[in-house]
Amino acid sequence: TNPPTAASKMGYGVGDYPLWYYLIQPAIAGIVGYVTNVLALEMTFRPIEFFGPELFRIKNQPWGLFGWQGIIPTKAEKMASVCFDLMTTKLLNIKEIFDRLRPEKFGEVMEDALLLMLDTIVNEVAMDFMPGVWSQLPKEVKDEIIVVMDIESESFLSSFMEDIKAHIDDILDIKQMTVSACVREKRLVNKIFQECGEKEFTFIRRSGFYFGFLFGLIQMGVFFVYDASWVLPFFGFLVGWATNWLALKVIFRPLEPHKFGPITIHGIFLKRQNEVSETFARV
């Protein structure tokens, strides 16, 4: 039998590979891009707590020697702190919000609820400090004391609210309360990001395949003329990194809309500022 000739092999490119060897590369690159983007998103949010033996781990870093914690749960404290600072310096003024409260209205609203609580409160306090005297009082006298206290409670609550408004920064550390709540409820922090960026995360997953396929075409062209052993691994790394990088750039850049003829280019997340703000406020 005669050995196969170059023509009978039907090889292509410098490596004389079959045609399918080249054509399959864009599809594989697209799959790699999709899988790496999906995996990156999963590792951003999960697991909520560190998974694995925590033998060695740098503070506020998601990775350990053997294990992983979602990036957002790991950074919950820092993210909550930055978010609170941005909101209270750029959007809201806590003192101004409390100044809008009407003390007299607060007293009216709390009157009925306070009346239900006064009986229990007065009884507990009296039994702690003067149990003998209180137990000897007739029920009518006890009821009269509670009614008088209820009448006086409205003015007390009004002055109480005035004091709170005047010293809100000394009484409440709202930032610490907010940050502590987010650290304690990491699932809530995840929920905020997932619901606000739901459409963008869908884009990241899908764009992994689209961008990966485009890089695969470049890879195919390079491999056709240069088939060194490092080309495929190099492009595999490039596809994984570049698809994430490009997706993030498309989402957040440019910050302001730019018109090029009939086309307007604007970060897809920034286009949805009103929608995202409503979702953020709701969550």
Image (spheres, helix red, strand yellow):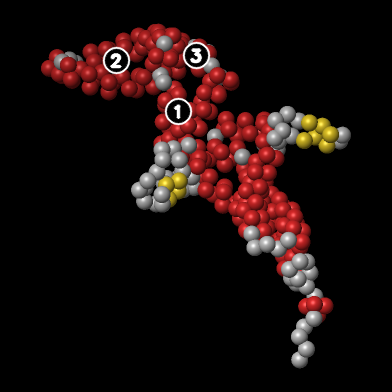
CA separation in Å, label 3 and label 1: 16 Å
> Which residue is labeled 2 in the image?
146
Q: x and y percent of residue 166 in the render?
A: 44, 9
Mark 3 or mark 2, which is nearer the start of the sequence? 3
Q: Nearer the viewer, residue 175 or 43?
A: 43
Residue 218 numbered tag: none
Q: Is residue 184 left or right of residue 208?
A: left
Residue 187 visible in image: no
Viewport quadrant of the C terminus? top right
**Amino acid marked by disc 1:** Thr
Q: Crowdedness of circle 1 by 10 Å Cα count: few (<14), some, many (20+)?
A: some
Q: Is residue 155 left or right of residue 89?
A: left
Mark 1 or mark 3, which is nearer the start of the sequence? 3
Residue lying farthest right?
261
Residue 5 visible in image: yes
**Amino acid marked by disc 3:** Lys
Q: Nearer the viewer, residue 96 or 66?
A: 66
> Which residue is labeled 3 in the image?
95
Q: Crowdedness of circle 3 by 10 Å Cα count: few (<14), some, many (20+)?
A: some
Q: Residue at x 50, y 42 (%)?
A: 71
Q: Nearer the viewer, residue 84 or 136?
A: 84
Q: x and y percent of residue 186 in the render?
A: 46, 39
**Amino acid marked by disc 2:** Ile
CA separation in Å, label 2 and label 1: 37 Å
